Amino acid sequence: MDQAIVQIRELSKLYRHGDIEVVALNSISLDIGRGEFVALMGPSGSGKSTLLHIIAGIDRPTSGRCVVEGTDVSELGETALAAWRKQHVGFVFQTFNLIPVLTAFENVELPLLLTGLSGRERRDHVEAALELVGLADRMKHLPRQLSGGQEQRVAIARALVTDPTLLVADEPTGNLDAHSAAEVLGLLQTLNSAAGKTVVMVTHDPKAAAHAKRMVHLEKGELLNGGGS
Amino acid sequence: MAIPLKYNLRNLRVRWRSTIATALGIALTVAVFVMVMALARGLKATYVNTGDARNLLVMRKGSTAESSSQIERSKVLRFKYHDEIARNERGDPVASPEIIVLIQLDRIDGGNANVLVRGIGPIGLELRPNVKLVEGRLFQPGLAECIVSRKIAARFAHCRVGETFRAGKRTWRVAGIFDATKTTYESEIWTDADEVREAFSRSFYGSVLLRPTDEAAGAALIKRLEVNKDLFVRVLPESEYYKEQTKNAGPIQFMGGFLAIIMSIGAAFAAMNTMYAAVGARTREIGTLRVLGFRRRDIYLSFLLESVLLALVGGGLGCLASLPINGLATGTMSWTTFSEVAFEFRITGELLLKGMTFAVVMGVLGGLLPARVAAQKPVLDALRSV
């Protein structure tokens, strides 16, 4: 394995629903190397999404450490975490989550508004990102004018545009038909192999997971086979 | 850079029905506010326009209005010929002993109202160069003649040239019509002071309006008359007197302000309701923006700004709606003379700016809580909302 970009050590996450405690993650340790394409797999409730959220810095562990490129994400405060996210994580959602009133171009530009880039630089980056996902001709379209597959590709462009350390995808094909799903997975694969992006993808679909270089199975909050594929 | 403004503008456009409904509520409030303030301003301006800074007004000490002042004829004669008072080309002192009485006249459109009759000295008109005869001729003392303002002629029955009306012990004949645009004289009837005293059984004058030879003489005269304990008078520049009378606009301003505040509370709640709905409908967007790296503060400002934009639309509409009344003439009751005062609504740029500020305040008040709710949503919960 290449040098680890994500180091997870004895990570646990407990949820409390009234008096009942639910263990979402139970003392997990896992390394993800630079340039890997990892599929986190498991049935519903296995804790795969929780793990992804912690890696992406939108959830916190109850105990244990999650170090991403030298930063222990579990120790960052709210504001620091927001700043860390915009620099290190590109997030792709199952439901695309584009802002409906903004065009494809404007959606992709959003994360760049948090950087110090000039308008011209932003435009160059956005155009390059949309070009990369094959939607250079759809820049002025609103999300509702795009197909599901196209929307997800715009979302991938938005996740990529800041050139983050990690590309994190939560069931990115869950809302797509087979053809669009194949397109999106192919795109993630290309980004990983050609552009060297580290991709962490949650899926429960073995066909989707097959596009990854490595599969990590979770069940009841624990890793199967110690995180090996 | 924060969340771009176009995000808010387009959201307002997308849910245009609720945007318009809320903006109309704010518009109505701003329109009422601007109109009432325009009314108060118009009234004030009328009073301020009336006074001539060159003239001095002599009233009984302690009086705050001409209507409550009394000065005996003998006292007038004691200072009327002082050297500080200017003389006209005929050598007469430019001083006009005056008296005002209230009479009731029938309105042309039904009902009646109190009208002020001002008895003036022969020189009264010379002291008020902004008042001009536009029809007929001046009244002749001793013949029970009068002149009426253009507004009175237009609003009251029997007030055209040649017509007569009964008041006091006399039947008065209208000899002429004068124009005193934008002053309180526009709501008066003028005739000879001594005839008024006789017809209404008054042994005294109310006040004396006079013109000193110059400013220094004026200051000297004020001193000379006011130190004279025997005379027991108060002397002040006419312009200052009318400035004091602007307090007539007070009750209107108060009522208007009160009404506008009550309405604004309603409008702010409407804005709040709209913004709560907007936050609710866009919870997942809020979560997405947070994941992209926008801070709670960015979300907070964005929603607050959207509420303010919404209010600005309303404020703009409200200002537009109030514009047609600019310059519109109407009348109201004066609280010192209990007669009608005619005036024009006055809308100024400054007043419109105040209206817009008022709208912004409503927007901010309406947006504070919803924006807070939006900013405090936990990212994961927000993302999971449908």
Image (spheres, coloured by chain):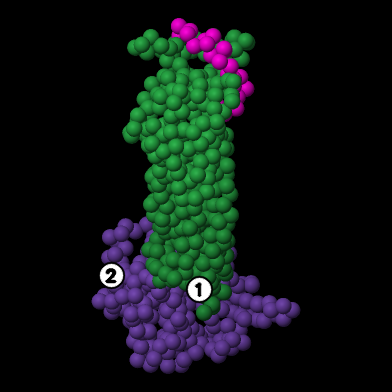
Query: Magenta residues, as a range?
Result: B60-84
Residue A166: image x %, image y %? 43, 73
- Write the residue at 44% across / 41% down: B158
Closer to the camera, A97 or B325? B325
Q: Badge 1, how many Cα within 10 Å: few under 14, some, many 20+?
A: few
Q: Secondary structure at mark 1?
A: helix
Residue A127: numbered disc: 2
Q: In the displayed image of the protein, which residue is found farthest to the right?
A: A19
Asked whether the viewer can see residue A65, the reply is: no
Closer to the camera, B95 or B199? B199
Give the distance between the C-alpha atoms of the residues marked 2 and 1, in whole angstroms.
30 Å
Residue B118: numbered disc: none
- Contact (CB < 8 A) between labels 2 and 1? no
Q: Tag 2: residue type?
A: Glu
Residue A65: image x %, image y %? 58, 71
Chain (purple): A
Q: Which residue is mark 1?
A: B281
Residue B340 versus residue A153 in the image, above or below:
above
- Write the residue at 65% across / 77% down: A14
